[in-house]
Amino acid sequence: AQSVSQHNHHVILSEAASLELGCNYSYGGTVNLFWYVQYPGQHLQLLLKYFSGDPLVKGIKGFEAEFIKSKFSFNLRKPSVQWSDTAEYFCAVNARAGTALIFGKGTTLSVSS
Amino acid sequence: DAGVTQSPTHLIKTRGQQVTLRCSPKSGHDTVSWYQQALGQGPQFIFQYYEEEERQRGNFPDRFSGHQFPNYSSELNVNALLLGDSALYLCASSFEGRETQYFGPGTRLLVL
């Protein structure tokens, strides 16, 4: 069965600090990978996704993620965080486009100004 | 262009009761998925509907059932509510075969 592990439960950063959130998945076949974000009081929004091709994908608001197949990882990065990046971040995977998403438990990011 | 909408936004029920949650997909989308998000957890997949049929189901008991209507909107029904059913219920829509699922704001259910 597929599973997703997010290593950091709560990350606290100051503005302008760099961010890296870890995500590892367990699945033997081809997967599609996603990062979703949930800002306070808002619904889940897609940050970025990987299906194939260049393993370095860029998303909205300056976020990027790198797919490393050998490590079963899809870590999220941002060079310089802002206070407005304070949110819950979820990594997710599915085996085929449009099918059930398997989510990690999420990482809460708190950015202080 | 309206996104995914869900109703009601909040709901309080007592143990043993039944509840129906509703979802309208994003315009042009024909596939609806339901997820349960317990406090402090990531969303867990309940089931997915396409062409008015349940196409995929997660590890949830038969107390959880659903329906999709010809206009692609969907309902989630939960019977014999348990305290542990308290959660945020999320609806996501997509277009068949396309990659991205778009989420609604959710319905927060509290079972007392």
Image: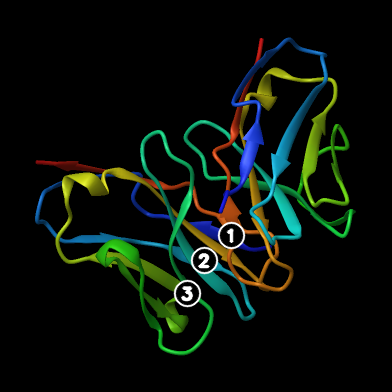
> Mark 3 and mark 2, same subunit?
yes
Q: Which mark is residue A72?
A: 3
B37 or B99: nearer the viewer: B99
Q: Can residue B58 be seen in this view?
A: yes
Task: Answer with the quarter of the image where residue A100 lies.
Answer: bottom right
> Mark 3 and mark 1, same subunit?
yes
In the picture of the structure, the residue carrying the numbered disc 1 is: A3
Q: Which amino acid does label 1 sit on?
A: Ser
Q: Which of marks 3 and 2 is nearer the N terminus?
A: 2
Q: Quadrant of the C terminus of chain B?
A: top right
The answer to whether marks 1 and 2 mark residues whose Cβ atoms lie closer than 8 Å is yes
Category of crowding for the residue at label 1, using alpha-carbon neighbours closer than 10 angstroms: few (below 14), some (14–19), many (at least 20): some
Q: Which amino acid does label 2 sit on?
A: Tyr
Location of residue B6 in the rendering, given as x and y in whole percent from the top left corner: 64, 36
**Real-space CA distance between mark 3 and mark 2, rounded to the nearest whole angstrom:** 6 Å
Chain of the residue on which disc 3 is drawn: A
Q: In this view, does B4 lie above or below B29?
A: above
> At x 61% / y 71%, what residue is drawn?
B99
* Element class at badge 2: strand
Q: Residue A25 carries which label?
A: 2
The answer to whether marks 3 and 2 mark residues whose Cβ atoms lie closer than 8 Å is yes
**Real-space CA distance between mark 3 and mark 1, rounded to the nearest whole angstrom:** 11 Å
**Real-space CA distance between mark 1 and mark 2, rounded to the nearest whole angstrom:** 6 Å
Location of residue A58 in the rendering, given as x and y in whole percent from the top left corner: 34, 74
* Element class at badge 3: loop
A82 or A32: nearer the viewer: A82
> At x 71% / y 40%, what residue is drawn?
B23
